Each structure stands twice: as C-alpha cells, then as structure tokens.
Image (cartoon, rainbow, N blue to C red):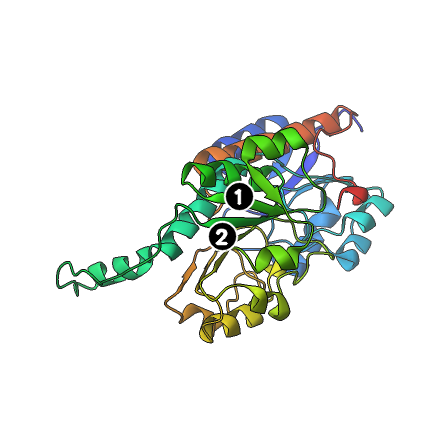
Amino acid sequence: MPSKRLSVVVTRRLPETVETRMKELFDVELRDDDRPWSREELAAAMQRADVLVPTITDRIDQALLAGAGERLKLIANYGAGIDHIDVATARQRGILVTNTPGVVTEDTADMTIALMLAVIRRIPEGLAVMQAGEWQGWAPTAFLGGRVGGKRLGILGMGRIGQAVARRARAFGMQIHYHNRHRLRPEIEEALEATYWESLDQMLSRMDVISVNCPHTPATFHLINARRLKLMKPSAIIVNTSRGEVIDENALTRALRAGEIAGAGLDVFEQRSSINPRLRELPNVVLLPHMGSATREGRIEMGEKVIINIKTFADSHRPPDLVLPSML
C-alpha cells in the first residue's frame, strides 16, 4: 500500500473513543447520523474507499462487490458475524475481509442466561403488571414459573459463546448437553460437565431449554424448522442470541401459539428488524432488540480490533482477524 493515509469509510456511528482514534490514524469518513445506509449509499462508499468499515446492517452481496472501486482492498467488519458479506466474492476480487471475534463472547453469554431467566421465571409479565399499576399483592399461585436448577440445557453450537453459556448455566445447577459440528476435546467436555449429542434431533427431544449459539451459514439456515420444533417437549423453551435465520420464525410462531413449546427468548430475528407481529403478541415470548453484545466495554473492544486489522493491513501484514471462505 502507498505511504499516504488510508481512506476509511465507516457506515455507522461508533463509540466516540473509537472514532477519535480512527481520525488520528486514517483519512476517515465518519457519520453524523446513525441511520442505516441505503444500497445506493453503500455502493457509493465502496467506490471511494480504500477500507470499508461496515456492520451487520450492511448487506454486501455479489452485486455490490462487482461495482466496488479499484481502491477498495479491505472490508474491516465491525462485528464477529460476517454472514452479511459475500466473503468468497470479495476474495475473488482481491478484497480482504476481517471481523472482530471473541470480543462479545462474555456479553452475549450473559444475555443468553438473562433471556432464559426472563422466560422461565416470567419476568416481563411481572414487570408489565407493575408498570401498569395493576398489582393487587402477593398470591400463592400468581406468576408461577419454573425452577432453573436441574433443568437440561441443550446448546446448539459449542464455540466460544456456547462454552461461555455452559459455564454460567452450570453455576445455576443446569445439566449441560450440546450438539456441534465437531465434538469438543475430552478435557473441555469434562471441565464443562457437558454431554455430546451427535444427533440434533435426539438432543432436542430431551431438553428443557435449547440455546442457539451457532453462526448462520448455508448449513444452519432454518436448522430449527417446523419438524424439529415438534420434537421438543411442550414444557421446553428456546433461546436465540446468535442469528435469526437459524430458526424458521414462522414455524416457531405457530408452535408457540399452538402450545407445542412453552416459550422463547429472542435477541435476533430472521428478517432483522422486521418481526412477525403475531410473535410480538405472545405473552410467553421475550423479545430484545439485538442487545446481546450491547455493552460499552464490548463496543469499544470491537472498535479496537477493527483499528488493529486496518493498521496491520496498512503496514502490509496479514490482519490478525482475516476471514477466509474456508472458515465459513
């Protein structure tokens, strides 16, 4: 790369400390507002930038990459998930893609446990009654939820976040089970006291709680579909803090409305911010606006990783968080 400062375009507002550091290091174009860019605005940015810093709200597909300018050589994604970027096409066009793995592990695991507790203990229902001023006092049979301790937790995807969820769940006295593309090493299984299921179907039919912690790939799209939802116990709940596309949302809504499963806690949705209105109406569902990684510390660390990736690239070295098509 030439010695001049790289032209970096950031698609969304980032923490102030991150933006200030970028301004010091690069010829950076920052946002004044925080609305998601249109496809046309994103295409224009890809024409004028050496480096693009997108987020999950920016879908960078084959068509957009085909129109990218000759200057664009790095897409430094602000976030760990990269299913919104056509990594294979980017590499074919000589554009590197990086992400920010590992930063949000603990934060997302915290939110997974919070959703479990919220659904099992019916916390939002109690909160709604209190906020409406309708509470008439304690009653022996009011707002009866379930006991978390002793329940069987089935984790779908035992990577960094799945393992962090398992560690927390053990502290609550839950029994840990998991399904993964590859079985964990024996010492990790032993430390987590985790039982491996090669068959996802068999695991689903025996668990009290299912936690979705796998990435969205072609192989995991609608992995939890209508058939698999019917395998779950009527008393079971499902929690998703990973990617909405892993669950067939319409099938989930039908299962919840029919009482085929007891509840759901969702931080992510199949159509991003467009949520099935029938899902929103259900009292046994807790919905959050993609808050899993929303901590000040996490957002700053994500920005620091982006900066390191760009700076390493500018110094003609391999960025530490380079994403390869073979990793997907």
248 left or right, relative to 233: right
Q: Would residue 79 be seen by someone viewing this image from the given angle?
A: no
> Residue 296: horizontal and vertical position, in percent?
44, 36
Q: Which label was assigned to residue 15?
A: none
> Residue 229: horizontal and vertical position, in percent?
57, 66
Please say if 198 is above or below 167.
below
167 left or right, relative to 135: right
Q: Residue at x 44, y 63 (%)?
A: 235
According to the image, label 1 marks what residue?
Answer: 176
**Helix, strand or loop for disc 1:** strand
Q: Amino acid at mark 1?
A: Ile
Q: Residue at x 69, y 36 (%)?
A: 7
Q: Amino acid at mark 2?
A: His
> Residue 233: horizontal and vertical position, in percent?
50, 64
According to the image, label 2 marks what residue?
Answer: 290
Q: Residues within 10 Å of mark 1 (few under 14, many from 20)?
A: many
Q: Residues within 10 Å of mark 2 (few under 14, many from 20)?
A: some
- Compare residues 162 and 25 and report the one nearer the observer: 162
**Helix, strand or loop for disc 2:** loop
137 left or right, relative to 106: left
> Residue 202: horizontal and vertical position, in percent?
63, 57
